[in-house]
Amino acid sequence: MGGSFEFKSERFLMRPPEPKDARQIACCVNDKDMARNLARLPHPYAPQDALDWIAYADKARAQGTEYAFVITHAEAGVIGSVGFNRSRGEAWEIGYWVDKAVQGKGVATEAAAALLEWGEVTFGVTQFVAGHFQDNPASGRVLEKLGFERVGEKQLYSLARGGKAPAWRYALRAPAELAMGNAH
């Protein structure tokens, strides 16, 4: 694993997920409330689902279409994930989740800020988009702290919800149309 696919924030190391992380990832995200707030997360979520995601993340990183990282803490190990994909052309879509045990402690904000900086330094990306389901206001607070602006409302799909639900879309230095054009 090249050092270029690892980066640090003040408290955390972000690195690509590895098979040894599967059990801890599954423990973090095998939660119905968390699954409802993510587009592609099945519920229940088993270690095999984590292994499938890790294999997908490796392939997507090799293809340059998506970059997923686990947020790791020196003592606690894997406590979340942050990443982005290139589905919107110039603007990259960011996403994140953190273990319930550490929610509300600035983990997502700190890790996502480091991700944005890494994306700018590594790829020269300056435009980002994001979104969250309207019944998950904590995610919106993270985006606002990062400087994202809410640009509109859209129905987004969630596997765990079994369909679409109202979501807010956000942009950071990107045209609102790019944020609103997201097909996820």
Image (spheres, helix red, strand yellow):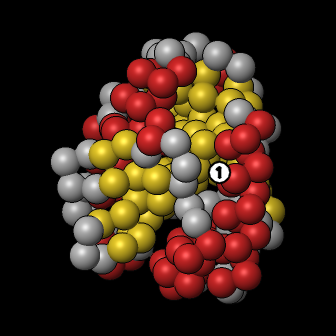
Position in image of residue 107 (x %, y %): 30, 57
Q: Residue at x 68, y 43 (%)?
A: 61
Farthest-out residue, left:
10
Q: Is residue 19 left or right of residue 147?
A: right
154 or 15, which lies in front?
Answer: 15
Q: From the image, which quarter does the C terminus lie in?
A: top right
Tally the numbered discs.
Answer: 1
Give the amino acid type for the residue marked by disc 1 in the picture: Pro
On screen, residue 98 versus residue 167, left or right, reads left
Q: Is residue 112 visible?
A: no
The residue that disc 1 covers is 166
Nearer to us in this view, 2 or 167: 2
* Residue shown at the point (58%, 13%) measured from the top left: 175
Give the percent coordinates (x, y) of residue 52.
76, 69
Q: Is residue 122 above or below residue 85?
A: above
Instruction: Say above or below: 68 vs 89.
Output: below
Image location (x, y in percent) of residue 64:
71, 33
Element carrying mark 1: strand
Residue 182, quarter of the rendered image = top right
Would residue 42 be found to the left or right of residue 17 on screen? right
On the image, the x and y values in percent for residue 75 come to 25, 76
**Disc 1: CA contacts within 10 A as few (<14), some (14-19) or many (>=20):** some
State the residue at coordinates (39%, 69%). Answer: 79
Q: Residue at x 30, y 71 (%)?
A: 102
Q: Quadrant of residue 11?
A: bottom left
